[in-house]
Image (tube, rainbow, N blue to C red):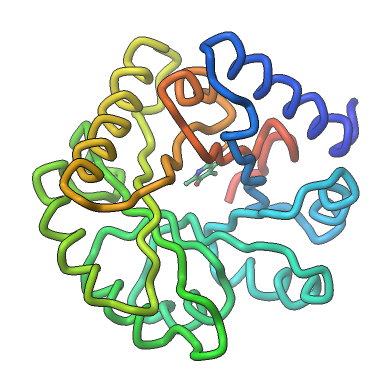
């Protein structure tokens, strides 16, 4: 079996060739390595392979890893579901939050962001297919939430995030990702300055990249299949 370093380098090659195949500049696509459930040793292997940005879903698992690797200056992204009683630790330990969809959480993160850290980068999660199992707001709620977030100085509004239904149907994936891209464009036409489309995982990165992803969140293709959690 390939090592984590080998899989990373293979994945970077894949991302570049997908990007070129749909006329995109590969350098515009950032790779976020999703290290949820992966131990510190695996993260270190990815760091050795040149990876600096990591995504975590579960705060209790993430904090010990963040502490253990503090000396490396890695960039940590919180990509999981936000709970009110966890916002202080999220605000204190992460550079990015990808799945914001509740103004109450935003207000707490803003208040709790330590003064010595730069503003917390935020992506808003959209739920474009109405799946009950997934978080996120509907497209119709976005303008209002964006407006309200502008008043929070310790949050830096960066973009939008979504997850399509788990399906191998690339046409469906592209529909959802394309919708997110158009939404971002609409918001920028209204004067916002969003530069991030956080979309694409191991199983749908081709569709996401061709629809304009600027950050793909990849776990399995780097670290291998996760044990059940
Ligand atoms: C787990 C997870 C990923 C990575 O998924 P893979 O299929 O392992 O690449 C990306 N985004 C979110 C929000 C996740 O929870």
Residue located at (63% from left, 47% from top): 34
Residue located at (53% from left, 25% from top): 205
Q: Quadrant of residue 148?
A: bottom left
Residue 143 at what x, y percent from top left? 13, 52
Of 200 and 185, nearer the camera is 185
Residue 81 at what x, y percent from top left? 39, 59
Q: Quadrant of residue 99?
A: bottom left
Q: Does 189 appear above or below 166?
A: below
Q: Is residue 1 left or right of residue 166?
A: right
Q: Is residue 199 left or right of residue 189?
A: right
Of 90 and 27, nearer the camera is 27
Q: Quadrant of ligand 1?
A: top right
Residue 68 at what x, y percent from top left? 80, 74
Residue located at (67% from left, 51% from top): 35
Count of numbered circles in the view: 0
Residue 226 at what x, y percent from top left? 66, 41
Q: Does 218 appear above or below 1?
A: below
Q: Does 22 appear above or below 47?
A: above
Q: Is residue 176 left or right of residue 23?
A: left
Of 24 and 224, nearer the camera is 24
């Amino acid at each position: 079996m390939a090592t984590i370093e080998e899989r990373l380098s293979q994945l970077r090659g894949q991302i570049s060739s997908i990007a070129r195949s749909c006329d995109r500049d590969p350098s515009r696509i950032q790779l976020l390595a999703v290290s949820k459930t992966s131990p510190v040793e695996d993260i270190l292997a990815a760091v050795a392979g040149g990876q600096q940005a990591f995504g975590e879903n579960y705060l209790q698992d993430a904090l010990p890893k963040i502490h253990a690797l503090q000396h490396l200056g890695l960039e940590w992204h919180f990509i999981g579901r936000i709970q009110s009683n966890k916002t202080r630790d999220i605000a204190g330990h992460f550079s990015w939050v990808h799945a914001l969809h509740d103004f109450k959480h935003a207000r707490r993160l803003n208040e709790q962001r330590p003064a010595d850290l730069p503003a917390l980068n935020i992506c808003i999660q959209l739920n474009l297919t109405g799946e009950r199992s997934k978080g996120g707001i509907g497209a119709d709620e976005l303008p209002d939430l964006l407006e309200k977030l502008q008043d929070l100085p310790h949050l830096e509004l960066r973009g939008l995030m979504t997850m399509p239904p788990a399906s191998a149907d690339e046409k469906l994936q592209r529909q959802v990702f394309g919708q997110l891209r158009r939404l971002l464009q609409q918001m920028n036409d209204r004067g916002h300055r969003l530069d991030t489309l956080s979309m694409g995982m191991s199983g749908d990165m081709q569709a996401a990249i061709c629809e304009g992803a600027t950050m793909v969140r990849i776990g399995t293709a780097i670290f291998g299949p996760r044990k059940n959690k």
